[in-house]
Image (cartoon, rainbow, N blue to C red):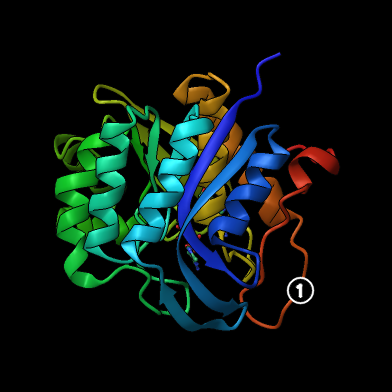
Amino acid sequence: MTTFKALTIAGSDSGGGAGIQADLKTFQELGVYGMSALTAITAQNTLGVQGVYPLSVEAVKEQMKSIADDLSPHALKTGMLFNAEIISAVADAVRIYSWEKLIVDPVMIAKGGVSLLQQESVQALIEKLIPLSYVITPNIPEAEVLTGMKIVTDEGVRKAAMSLHNMGAKHVVIKGGHAAHPDEAVDVLFDGTDFFEFSSPRFQTENTHGTGCTFAAAITSELAKGQSLYDSVKTAKAFITAAIKNELGIGSGHGPTNHWAYKRTGVSV
Ligand SMILES: Nc1ncnc2c1ncn2[C@@H]1O[C@H](COP(=O)(O)OP(=O)(O)O)[C@@H](O)[C@H]1O
Ligand SMILES: Cc1ncc(COP(=O)(O)O)c(N)n1
């Protein structure tokens, strides 16, 4: 039996709800062997981000080399990359090691407002990483920054998806957590030709810390196993919906989601 392997290149969240920790928990739940290359350490909990400590670019490069030399991933995702130097190193690694199925989750700002990507690095993301991506998974504010468009309507979401596709992303998923729909959370997939919508009820909750990371990690897991992109997004949507619906209620701020709900509570969504 093949063991499918997935890699996350992202920051550590000491509170365990987002970043590397969310990604590895998701890989594990979806039956994929998880590996990580850390880009930064954050001191973080459900109340916010108290500290950000980026690693040296050498440390990031060496982790990726160790993985490439021995444990080539079937799919990989990026999360918090923090600066342009790290973005360039990741883009180089993807090319040098011929890594396919790159999922770029363009993490920019933590829910409390602290920056997880230096503002001047957005251009590096656009020029170096987006053209290598198999899928890019921005939330609406991130899609606005990357495209320079203001997104207000469903039509606006579709236009931004086309623009990101024109920037070189093979596929685009714009996540709808920040959209105006009062009852539904709708994510939109664009494959360069057609649009597909993935909808769930919108839960009235503050506990959405790490939803974006978890959703992108679930897509990565399913792609690593060889599923089609459509099926991968469908599973990821079910995974994140179960994780939000069955919130853990820990911490006194924006709490994490429940990574084991999808597999272990038998909830249907
Ligand atoms: N209140 C909510 N109820 C149901 N699903 C949600 C809710 N908030 C976010 N989601 C879903 O969680 C995933 C992450 O979305 P989003 O919050 O937009 O990303 P990010 O965490 O990157 O800001 C998407 O699948 C989105 O539809
Ligand atoms: C280390 C790290 N990476 C990413 C996020 C974004 O979290 P979210 O998925 O809630 O946007 C975070 N808060 N911390």
Residue 128 position within the rendered picture, expressed as x and y whole percent measured from the top left: 18, 46
Q: Is residue 133 visible?
A: yes
The front one of 132 and 68 is 68
Residue drawn at point x = 84 percent, y = 41 percent: 264
Question: In the picture provided, is 42 more to the left or to the right than 142?
Answer: right
Residue 194 position within the rendered picture, expressed as x and y whole percent measured from the top left: 30, 23
Picture quadrant where residue 28 is located: top right
Secondary structure beneath disc 1? Answer: loop
Q: Residue furthest top?
A: 1
Q: Is residue 225 above or below residue 68?
A: above
Question: In the picture provided, is 173 more to the left or to the right than 232?
Answer: left
Disc 1 residue lies near ligand 2 with CB under 8 A:
no
Amino acid identity at mark 1: Ile
The front one of 168 and 243 is 168
> The C terminus is located in which quarter?
top right
Residue drawn at point x = 67 percent, y = 56 percent: 244
Q: Is residue 179 visible?
A: no
Local packing at callout 1 (Cα closer than 10 Å; few below 14, some 14-19, many 20+) is: few
Residue 48 position within the rendered picture, expressed as x and y whole percent measured from the top left: 54, 81
The front one of 251 and 70 is 70
Q: Would you name the residue on which mark 1 appears?
A: 250
> The N terminus is located in which quarter?
top right
Q: Residue furthest bottom?
A: 50
Q: Residue furthest right?
A: 265
Residue 239 position within the rendered picture, expressed as x and y whole percent measured from the top left: 65, 41
Q: Is residue 231 above or below residue 246?
A: above
Residue drawn at point x = 22 percent, y = 71 percent: 119
Picture quadrant where residue 170 is located: top left
